[in-house]
Image: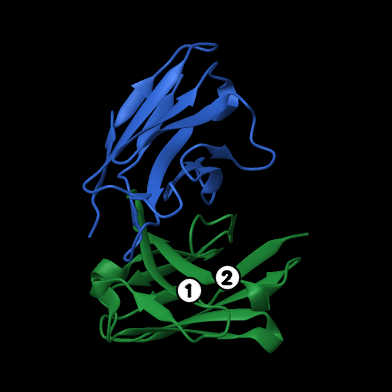
Chain colours: A green, B blue
Amino acid sequence: EVQLVESGGGLVQPGGSLRLSCVASGFTFGTSWMTWVRQAPGKGLEWVANIKEDGGEIYYVDSVKGRFTISRDNAKNSLFLQMNSLRAEDTAVYYCARGVYAFDIWGQGTMVTVSS
Amino acid sequence: DIVMTQSPDSLTVSLGERATINCKSSQSVLYSSNNKNYLAWYQQKAGQPPKLLIHWASTRESGVPDRFSGSGSGTDFTLTISSLQAEDVAVYYCHQYYNTPRTFGQGTKVEI
């Protein structure tokens, strides 16, 4: 079964850090661009970052540049998002998704809440 | 950044009737070298992740019912549900992947 499973979300204070993980199965992870998309409560979708198959190209939305780092471990079929200096406005469900163009596989998401 | 604007924000349609959602981009998402529109549509049901319905503006994803169709080119696009079913109640998003940052429309809520 083709699947993406996120983990690592939770409650964190402003200024804190979290590391999200996404484990892939059922497809060749190492030949797929991967993406993080977030959705604030009751709001729309926002693209956060993506990473090329070999990690050689990485892109971020301006609002997270310098604070978030996307990475991957192809040997473990895993995608990561290291989030530092978290702000209240980073509160959202974070989805990992496959693709650099349209996103054809999505995980169920992991909730990140930034609050004191 | 390319701004994606959907209309309407919400739509109430009777069962079996047609639903039409529009999406306008602030600049063209048609790549002239391959004549492809870098535009996708997603469906998101309550409590679920988004699901890809349409990519390249008009190519239906495998397994998506043929009542869903996409059309348009350049800056103006449409998602049509030809005969609305109860299971189509959801929020629909357009998405441009012409350049970075990737951007989404604000969503259109479809109700019965």
Mark 2, secondary structure of its residue: strand
Cα distance in 3D space between marks 2 and 1: 8 Å
Chain bearing mark 2: A
Q: What amino acid type is highlighted by mark number 2?
A: Glu
Residue A47, horizontal then vertical, whole percent? 37, 63
Q: Is residue B67 above or below residue A41?
A: above
Q: Which residue is mark 1?
A: A9
Q: Is residue B2 above or below residue B101?
A: above
Q: Which residue is mark 2?
A: A6
Tell me the residue at 52%/18% (across/down): B82
Tell me the residue at 46%/25% (across/down): B80
Residue B44, horizontal then vertical, whole percent? 49, 43
- Mark linked to residue A95: none
Q: Is residue A50 left or right of residue A12?
A: right
Mark 2 against mark 1, which lies toward the viewer? 2
* Residue A116 in sight in this render: no
Image quarter of residue A21: bottom right
Most foreground residue, B74 or A76: B74
**Pointer 2 and pointer 1: residues touching (CB < 8 Å)?**
yes
Residue A58, horizontal then vertical, whole percent? 42, 81
